[in-house]
Amino acid sequence: MENKGLSAVIIGATGLVGSTLLLQLLEDSRYEKVITLSRKRIPNNHPKHENYLADLFDPTTYKEELQGDHLFICTGTTKANTPDSEEYYRIEHDLPVDVAKTARENGINKVIAISALGADPNSRFSYNKGKGEMERDIEKLEFERCYFVQPALISGDRQEKRTFEDLWGKFQKLIDPLLVGSFKKYRTIHPQTIARAMIDVAVNDYKQSRIESDALKEIASIES
């Protein structure tokens, strides 16, 4: 496929990375259409943007609109916002897997999903375990191409308050310069960098399906 006239679908376009990704895709000449599926209306009137209201837990509310070349999954939550463990797992695992399944049925051939550094279905930590299971189960759908970006702590202003992450972010700024060599991947990363790398991977592909934080920075620097 030529890298022109592409269409993208984003879920999670109201979040920190998703909203940044939306803006970048709308300004990218390789994409002629950007579809967002969201619970609330997204106030962006760009001519390339098509926003559809949907309940992402119910595929019947978005199946017809989930059409395109690339699916970008940017959904997620926190334990603070979703303390119930079953609901947390539904958002972190079930929702992206179900959307990806519908996309596969609709003929979308490539998915790029935000995961996390350390994602592992066998992890002792529930967050990493859930992300790892999400990766595993989307991979089972056998897309033509399937990528999982694994950022470290993401810097930036969020709509919701994340007290622990805010405090850790301040500490992280102090230790980032000390993280070198194999520890470099643990440095904070900006949402603009993640979004830019996701687009580059979608358009140009990448040698690995799981892309850690330091590699995302390298891809974004090449793209820019």
Image (cartoon, helix red, strand yellow):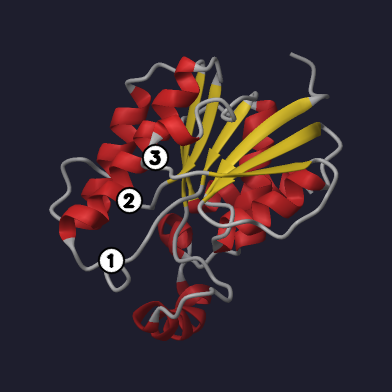
Residue at image x 36%, y 25%? 139
Q: Tell which of 126 and 46 is nearer to you.
A: 46
The residue where tag 1 is placed is 82
Q: Could you give the CA–CA distance between mark 3 and mark 2, rounded to whole angstroms?
A: 7 Å
Tell me whether the residue at label 3 lies in contact with that at label 2, contact meaning CB atoms closer than 8 angstroms. Answer: no
Question: Element type at marker 1?
Answer: loop
The residue where tag 3 is placed is 96
- Residue 22 on image: x %, y %: 69, 50
The residue where tag 2 is placed is 91
Q: Earlier in the sequence, mark 1 or mark 3?
A: 1
Question: Element type at marker 3?
Answer: helix
Q: Could you give the CA–CA distance between mark 2 and mark 1, rounded to whole angstroms?
A: 9 Å
Q: Is residue 18 left or right of residue 33?
A: left
Q: Tell which of 47 and 201 is nearer to you.
A: 47
- Residue 60 on image: x %, y %: 43, 30
Q: Tell which of 141 and 176 is nearer to you.
A: 141
Q: Which mark is residue 190?
A: none
Q: Is residue 14 above or below residue 159?
A: above
Tell me whether the residue at label 2 lies in contact with that at label 1, contact meaning CB atoms closer than 8 angstroms. Answer: yes
Residue at image x 61%, y 36%? 9
Tell me whether the residue at label 1 lies in contact with that at label 3, contact meaning CB atoms closer than 8 angstroms. Answer: no
Residue type marked 2 = Ile
Residue type marked 1 = Thr
- Residue 174 on image: x %, y %: 49, 84
